[in-house]
Amino acid sequence: MTEVTQPALTIDALGKKCPIPIIMLAAQINHVPLNAVVAVLADDPAAYTDVPAWCRLKSHRHVGSYELPEGGWAIHVRRNY
Amino acid sequence: MSLVAYFDAASSEPLHPQAREALLAAIDVGWADPARLYGQARRARLLLEQARTEVAEALGARPDEVSFTSSGTQAVHLGVLGTLHGRRRVGRHLVTTAVEHSSVLHAGGVHERDGGTVETVGVDLTGRVDLDRFAEAVARPGTALACLQTANHEVGTLQPVAEAAAACRANGVPLLVDAAQTAGRMPVPSGWSVLAASAHKWGGPAGVGVLVVRKGTRFRSFLPEDERERRRVPGFENVPGIVAAAAALRAMAAEASQEQARLAELVGKIRETVPKIVPDVEVIGDPDERAPHIVTFSCLYVEGEALLTELDKAGFAVSSGSSCTASTLRPSHVLEAMGVLTHGNVRVSLPRGASAVEVDRFLAALPEVVRRIRQDAGVA
């Protein structure tokens, strides 16, 4: 079991429809140091697929998606460059 | 009136001129009940059986294996549930894939609510089914039916039907092939036991689907008894529509090798050009193993509905798998299963006769449309 890295930044995109969570992530990923983790909180089902797909397209790393007790996910992304 | 380039053939192909001609003629002479025993009835029956023979020939089947339905969706529903019903003593397990048309998945839902089981096999990033897992799934004892599309309706990727059929055959499991996207455009792959297709996708009229059940495949309609269409499809046949559907299929198939190759080239041009002229875009689906007329791409940071609205204003009729467009809350199950972007999605599907000029006009208009939407959304 690996520990979940504490995110250096949490983006609250709850209640926001895609592509807004992705736009917020793209705008803020460079606000954290290299190799730090950004958590995107989202409850649009599209975000569950789109954040990992964005990581693949942008060569960042999708660390994992964790269900939130109130619904939605905390989707963790590691800044690669 | 503005000139609109119609690029949504995967939703519906415009009526083929030969289908229109046949429809108008058949409306006048093919209205009587083909099951009766007088002159007008005989004429309707003759038209119906002639159409059946033509459709059978085009799909590589025998005429007595072909039944006409009221839509492709109905053909799938009856095909899935009728085969499951016919084989219920063998077992109640259904194998399907995560990217099948919703008609297949919803028929599976009915089967599940009725106490049956469903296994949904996943796909890779191009949308192609995991063949090893599919073969494992159909080998499971109690499997009554497996379903696989010829090509995916949202991204155009061809499925390995022949290989899947071989795995089914090895286990004595019938394979239902959903040929809606390729019938009339490409030869039907061999090895299927049940086949479903839809006439308005090959240039026939709306209101006609085809259900083909191979001789020797156990099949029993789950609907109230009716004598029409070899007891497989209830209700009075739409003879004029069926005649027109057969005329369209014959005409489409006759031109297919040339016309579909031409469309495949235009699709290739779109696939190649879009990533060069629009930043942050992903062309999805298999680049080579694909239906000739479909190309799909997703634009990052762009809302699908905004994209379709702007393209409509600019004179392009296209479709999208992005959630907001379908007035459903969920994104496209196909894009989700592939793990590709579900927003900013555009499907271009070229009808017969789509011109290079129209495609060039689309490629000229697209970058500015995307740029404007991104700018309005505050994306640099």
Image (tube, rainbow, N blue to C red):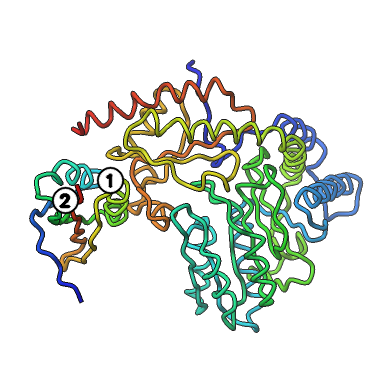
Location of mark 1 (residue):
A58
A80 vs B302, nearest the viewer:
A80
> Up-down: is B188 above or below B299?
below
What is the spatial separation of the Cα atoms under label 1 and label 2, in whole angstroms? 20 Å
Residue drawn 17% across the image and 44% down it: A24
Q: Are marks 1 and 2 on the same chain?
A: yes
Quadrant that contains the C terminus of chain B: top left
Task: State left or right for residue B251 relative to residue B41.
Answer: left
- Residue B167 picture location, percent across and down: 64, 71
Residue B74 placement: quadrant: bottom right
- Residue A68 picture location, percent across and down: 17, 65
Task: Say whether disc 1 or disc 2 marks the residue closer to the N-terminus.
Answer: 2
Which amino acid lies under the numbered mark 1 shown in the image of this protein? Lys
Residue drawn 91% across the image and 46% down it: B39
Task: State left or right for residue B118 relative to residue B303.
Answer: right
Characterize the local packing of mark 2: few (<14), some (14-19) or many (20 or more) Cα atoms within 10 angstroms. Answer: many
> Up-down: is B135 above or below B307?
below
B98 vs B90, nearest the viewer:
B98
Disc 2: host chain: A
Instruction: Please tell me whether mark 2 sits on a helix, a strand or a loop.
Output: strand
Q: Nearer the viewer, mark 1 or mark 2?
A: 1
Which amino acid lies under the numbered mark 2 shown in the image of this protein? Ala
Task: State left or right for residue B355 relative to residue B99.
Answer: right
Q: Which mark is residue B361?
A: none
Characterize the local packing of mark 1: few (<14), some (14-19) or many (20 or more) Cα atoms within 10 angstroms. Answer: some
Location of mark 2 (residue):
A13
B27 vs B50, nearest the viewer:
B50
Residue B195 in view of the camera: yes
> Up-down: is B288 above or below B133?
above
Residue B33 in view of the camera: no
